Amino acid sequence: MEPNASRDICNCEQAKEEQQMNDLQKIFQVYQYFLLGAQMYALFVKSQPLNCIQLVAKRIHNYLKVSIALRKKNWKDVEEFVTNHPDALHDDITETRENIFHFLGQFNEAIGLVNKFLIKVPLKSLERTNIEGITALAIAALSGNTEAAKAFVNKNKKLLSMNKNVLCKTDIKKFLGNKINPPSREDMEKFVKEKLECPEECTFLSVHAAGYYSRKETVEYLMSETAKVVELTQDIGRLLLKILINSNLFGTALDLLEQYPELASNEGNRYWKKKN
């Protein structure tokens, strides 16, 4: 076979695999929205079977004022709104299911409001996720807001071990590699559904989010706290090590290795397999 022909075949196969991976990611996103719709329907249909969409729209409209104030960092207006509408601390305030703590976790200067509002809510309020499965702690982590992260963790340590539902390339390649023939649309949908229904298989935590965005101070704080509630010697730690290295946080990666030297082993480490 001519070298050029061999190269063309290789490029064609690579393009086909990339297309399949993109298709799976799109199906995954569609199913996330589908599951959200089912959850919202189950929530509202019991009491208002004909008006669930109107109820959601009305709720979002009612919180439009505070959403704008949050985006403009007008903390005085935010506090005044919450004083007059205390349900704003418990409800979703956007169509993508963000609550008020998702917004406040982004801004260092909002720590006063964070501490003031946290006193007024139960633990589970912080376990609420937006449409992408992201908690307020994860938002604080990727924003590098260490003070907010500390406040959230002190309120509810369960947040440290809450996973974001992700579909990683390793899982996709494994799925595609197990198929003799190209997977059908039905195969892909079945695979995605299984992944979404088994979030315990996912290992992307808030500490990973902080590392991914190179938030050194935040990732070091979350690393020490996360180690108290989950085992960092398994996939969680291996993925964290890889993220730290890829984000050029070499000192933090070295600290992690000094605490857990077994993470340097390639045995059983799916994150360090050589590329073909």
Image (cartoon, grey):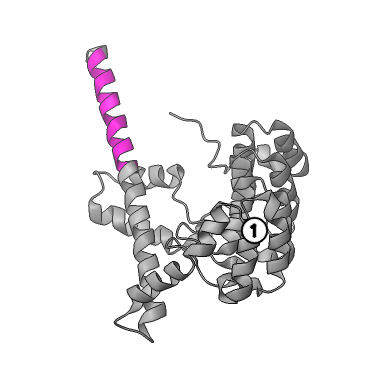
Element type where label 1 sits in the image: helix
User: Quick check: 142 left or right of 97?
Assistant: right
Q: Nearer the viewer, residue 140 or 4?
A: 140
Reading the image, the residue beneath label 1 is 75
Residue 118 sits above or below residue 149 on the image: below
Q: Residue 102: image x %, image y %?
A: 57, 58
Snapshot quadrant of residue 12 = top left
The residue drawn where x is 74% and y is 49% is 221
Magenta range: 4-21
The quarter of the image holding the N terminus is top left
**From the viewer's perspective, is residue 262 above or below residue 162?**
above
- Quadrant in which the C terminus appears: top left
Q: Position of residue 39 (x, y in %)?
A: 40, 72
**In magenta stretch: residue 11:** yes
Residue at 59% x, 49% y is 235
Left or right position of 40 against 50: right
In this view of the protein, which residue sits in the foreground, 9 or 218?
218
In this rendering, does residue 238 appear at all? Answer: no
Specify the amino acid type for callout 1: Trp
Q: Position of residue 203 (x, y in %)?
A: 56, 53
Q: Is residue 230 visible?
A: yes
- Among the 4 quarters of the image, the one containing residue 9: top left
Q: Is residue 248 magenta?
A: no
x and y percentages locating residue 117 in the rendered image: 68, 68
Magenta segment, prevailing SS (helix, strand or loop): helix
At label 1, counting other C-alpha atoms closer than 10 Å, the crowd grade (few under 14, some 14-19, many 20 or more) is some
Along the line of sight, the residue nearer the viewer: 108 or 158: 108
